[in-house]
Amino acid sequence: MASSNRVALVTGANKGIGFAITRDLCQKFSGDVVLTARNQALGQAAVQQLQAEGLSPRFHQLDVDDLQSIRAIRDFLLKEYGGLAVLVNNAGIVLTNYCSSQQGTDPTHVHIQAEAAMKTNFFGTRAICTELLPLIKPQGRVVNVSSMLSLRALKNCSSELQQKFRSDTITEEELVGLMNKFVEDTKKGVHEKEGWPNSAYGVSKIGVTVLSRIHARKLSEQRKGDKILLNACCPGWVRTDMAGPKAPKSPEEGAETPVYLALLPPNAEGPHGQFVREKQVEQW
């Protein structure tokens, strides 16, 4: 077992916001920080960059689309640390913000966007949570990086879908069914008629935000005394490969809210099950 028994893990951490979150945690978290990346060479290069700054993250390969890879990191965390203190689910993709933007309404393109965004952003995050939430130690912190585009996409859903996504009793199975239905509706070219917005990325992030609400509710019911806090957050529009050079925020500024949530003090009562932006709870 590692010398430190506390560990924080960041997914998709070799560049952008994930890299900035990892750097911040290396400076502020009392314990080990594990930088993960899908590509081993890029992940190790990121670790070397932080080591050159005098920081000492550990590296572990992790592809959130690959269950075998997720289970390998689960086993590593159990063996080395006996659990996990902080989990930051940052890994995600964006193709274009609006699934029919430059390509008109080509249904094939819309469907490709929806399938790819959903696979990584929603189902990848869900798979990580399924395997790693049971490892979260008492007073642990879980941060799922979502986006304000989830709120915008929610407001562009039909009132029936909005009601479902805002429900305090929606189950994980129901949410999975809705996410699959969106992908299926794009395949059939009927997603707008069925009340969905035109943003594949936005809908995938609705999934992340609602999943966070569900998991927080489950933690409150099943592990009430453990004082685990789990939230979704928006880092803001950040200058990354994903969001482009015109974004107003630096990656370091984008890391502020996720790191704030990751380091909520042990006696904090909240936020929990919330959607947080600029360290403030947003109405979902």
Image (cartoon, rainbow, N blue to C red):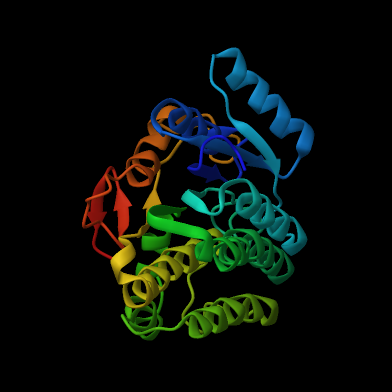
Image-quadrant location for residue 2: top right
**Residue 147 visible somewhere in the drawing:** no
Q: Residue at x 42, y 40 (%)?
A: 237
Q: Nearer the viewer, residue 134 or 262?
A: 134
Instruction: Pick the residue in front: 196 or 275.
Output: 275
Residue 16 in sight from this viewpoint: yes
Q: Quick check: 165 left or right of 266? A: right
147 or 153, which is in the foreground? 147
**Which quadrant holds residue 217?**
bottom left
**Number of numbered discs:** 0
Position of residue 49 measured from the top left corner of the image (x, y, whole percent): 63, 19
Residue 246: image x %, image y %?
48, 31
Q: Is residue 196 left or right of residue 42?
A: left
Closer to us: 199 or 279: 279
Indicate whether 197 appears above or below 232.
Answer: below
Compared to 51, does 121 lie above or below? below
The picture places residue 11, in percent across and down from the top left corner, at 59, 46
Q: Residue at x 58, y 59 (%)?
A: 121
Residue located at (63% from left, 75% from top)? 183
Question: Image quadrant of residue 163?
Answer: bottom left
Residue 178 position in % (x across, y down): 53, 81
| Residue displayed at 51% across by 63% down | 133
Q: Quadrant of the C terminus?
A: bottom left
Q: Name the quadrant of the N terminus.
A: top right
